[in-house]
Image (tube, grey):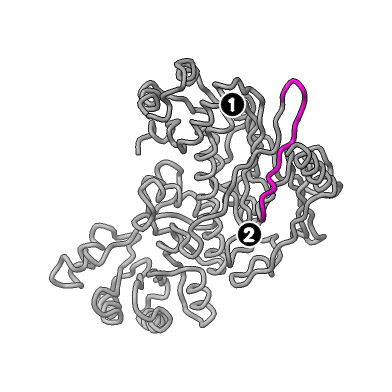
């Protein structure tokens, strides 16, 4: 996908534009506030790591309908009765609103606003699809990466999942999110170039198989890459390959184990490498790994120095989607602010613009979060949602990706251990303020009367 299509206003659902047309035709010009949040966390997720905000803001800053896109919309039968004035309006369309958001790298929990948009209704409406897909996807992958990094207990994790990602573009953004979550680098070159993420790679089984002899393949690779070579040793016989390395006096930076019993093979390989004078040669493990497999390997004493994680990470295989929603919370007109909430069964939403306040224990760990009205101020708490865009423009430069990664690592260490564990995490305490609850009751009463 080209940069042009990545910024296309057509990266949305049809009903966003049909609603926009209906708003326009009916002269609906109120300013609207929408909040984006995840209703509830997936199984085995005690927290999420916010990610994707930079791409969301970039999109909003550059959003416009181009001539060919407007022509395409005109050609759709659903717009047959829409006046030409609407399409003229689209020619000058830009996002002019305000955005508040939780900084990337921040741990968040269910029902907490990740982002709030306040803008003229049409502008706030048509961006829903892009914002949801960008923020929930990257937050999902960053959260998975944080779990993998936690399981590795300080050992290096490299993201290897581009070939299993749901498309090349998803692979690039997955690499970015995985870096935020705690990976030291990626195999994806475009992610490396575009985002400045360190890139890593070894060699494939096909390289070894391309030559008649494994030893010859190793030698040819070492000749070209004499300083930082990682040799894949499981093409034929893992321990036999290690013997060849020792016999030839090679000193690879690492040997890579990609199949078989990684626990047993890593122990055998470590002992043989040490006995052969290759104590500095590390062991790199890959092959259908996730946080659970890594935790189990290390718990049983596997002497692995670093891991490559692919499919499970780039797709968040056990939890491949988040229940992200984008809900209208208020409307602002000349008459003032009118609050909005949804009351359908099990999908109730709270009205009004909100702030998330985080309380800490004396040791710095998180104690509880309170979702409150934006106008509230809770003493002793840290407000998480901050203004990042006004009048359609960012109000400050985006932080460097490494700074976001550092933030995620530091903040993740403050999550209560019971809430951060890999299996059956305890639910972190998130409550709603008394004032917000009272507002919900008042809006519900008002809506009952109107209905």
| Nearest to the observer: residue 139 or residue 207 | 139
Relative to 3, 442 lies left or right: right
Q: Which residues are magenta?
A: 333-345
**Residue 291 visible within the image:** yes
| Residue 410, disc | none
Q: Position of residue 304 (x, y in %)?
A: 45, 74
Can you name the residue that lies furthest to the right here?
379
| Nearest to the observer: residue 434 or residue 235 | 434
Q: Residues within 10 Å of mark 2 (few under 14, many from 20)?
A: many
Relative to 248, 448 lies left or right: right
Residue for point 45% across, 19% down: 87
**Mark 2 to mark 1: distance in Å?**
30 Å
Screen quadrant of the N terminus = top left
**Residue 109 visible within the image:** no
Q: Which residue is mark 2?
A: 47
Q: Position of residue 259 (x, y in %)?
A: 34, 75
| Nearest to the observer: residue 82 or residue 394 | 82
- Is 432 inside the magenta-drawn segment? no
Residue for point 71% across, 38% down: 340
What element does badge 2 sit on?
loop
Query: Relative to 324, does residue 302 appear above or below in the rendering?
Result: below
Q: Which residue is mark 1?
A: 392
Q: Earlier in the sequence, mark 2 or mark 1?
A: 2
Query: Relative to 243, does residue 331 appear above or below in the rendering?
Result: above
Q: Residues within 10 Å of mark 1 (few under 14, many from 20)?
A: some
Q: Position of residue 147 (x, y in %)?
A: 56, 64
Query: Relative to 146, does residue 407 appear above or below in the rendering?
Result: above
| Nearest to the observer: residue 250 or residue 439 | 439
Screen quadrant of the C terminus = top right
What element does badge 1 sit on?
loop
Q: How many marks?
A: 2
């Amino acid at each position: 996908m080209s940069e042009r299509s990545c910024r296309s206003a057509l990266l949305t659902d049809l009903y966003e534009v049909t609603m926009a047309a209906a708003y326009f035709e009916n002269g609906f010009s109120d300013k609207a506030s929408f909040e984006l949040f995840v209703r509830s966390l997936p199984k085995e997720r005690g927290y999420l790591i916010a990610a994707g905000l930079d791409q969301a803001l970039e999109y909003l800053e550059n959003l416009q309908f181009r001539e060919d896109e407007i022509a395409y919309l005109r050609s759709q039968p659903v717009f047959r009765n829409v006046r030409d004035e609407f399409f003229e309006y689209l020619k000058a369309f830009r996002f002019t609103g305000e955005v508040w958001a939780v900084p990337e790298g921040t741990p968040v929990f269910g029902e907490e606003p990740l982002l709030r948009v306040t803008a003229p209704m049409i502008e706030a409406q048509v961006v829903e699809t892009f914002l949801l897909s960008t923020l929930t996807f990257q937050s999902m992958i960053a959260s998975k990466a944080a779990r993998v990094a936690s399981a590795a207990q300080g050992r290096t994790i490299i993201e290897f999942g581009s070939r299993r990602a749901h498309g090349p573009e998803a692979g690039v953004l997955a690499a970015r999110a995985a870096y935020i979550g705690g990976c030291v680098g990626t195999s994806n070159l475009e992610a490396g170039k575009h985002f400045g993420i360190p890139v890593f790679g070894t060699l494939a089984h096909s390289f070894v198989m391309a030559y008649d002899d494994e030893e010859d393949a190793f030698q040819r690779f070492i000749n070209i890459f004499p300083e930082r070579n990682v040799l894949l040793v499981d093409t034929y016989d893992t321990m036999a390959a290690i013997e060849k390395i020792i016999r030839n006096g090679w000193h690879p930076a690492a040997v890579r184990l990609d199949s078989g019993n990684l626990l047993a093979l890593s122990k055998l390989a470590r002992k043989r490498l040490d006995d052969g004078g290759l104590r500095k040669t590390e062991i790199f493990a890959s092959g259908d790994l996730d946080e659970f497999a890594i935790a189990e390997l290390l718990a049983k004493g596997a002497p692995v120095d670093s891991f490559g994680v692919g499919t499970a990470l780039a797709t968040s295989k056990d939890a491949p989607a988040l229940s992200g929603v984008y809900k209208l919370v208020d409307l602002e007109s000349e008459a003032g602010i009118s609050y909005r909430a949804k009351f359908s069964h099990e999908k109730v939403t709270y009205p009004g613009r909100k702030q998330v306040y985080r309380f800490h224990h004396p040791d710095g760990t998180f104690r509880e979060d309170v979702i409150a009205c934006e106008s509230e101020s809770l003493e002793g708490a840290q407000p998480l949602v901050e203004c990042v865009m006004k009048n359609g423009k960012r109000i400050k430069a985006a932080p460097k990706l490494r700074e976001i990664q550092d933030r995620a690592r530091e903040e993740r260490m403050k999550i209560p251990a019971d809430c951060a564990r890999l299996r059956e995490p305890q639910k972190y305490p998130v409550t709603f303020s008394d004032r917000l609850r009272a507002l919900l009751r008042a809006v519900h009463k008002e809506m009952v009367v109107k209905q």
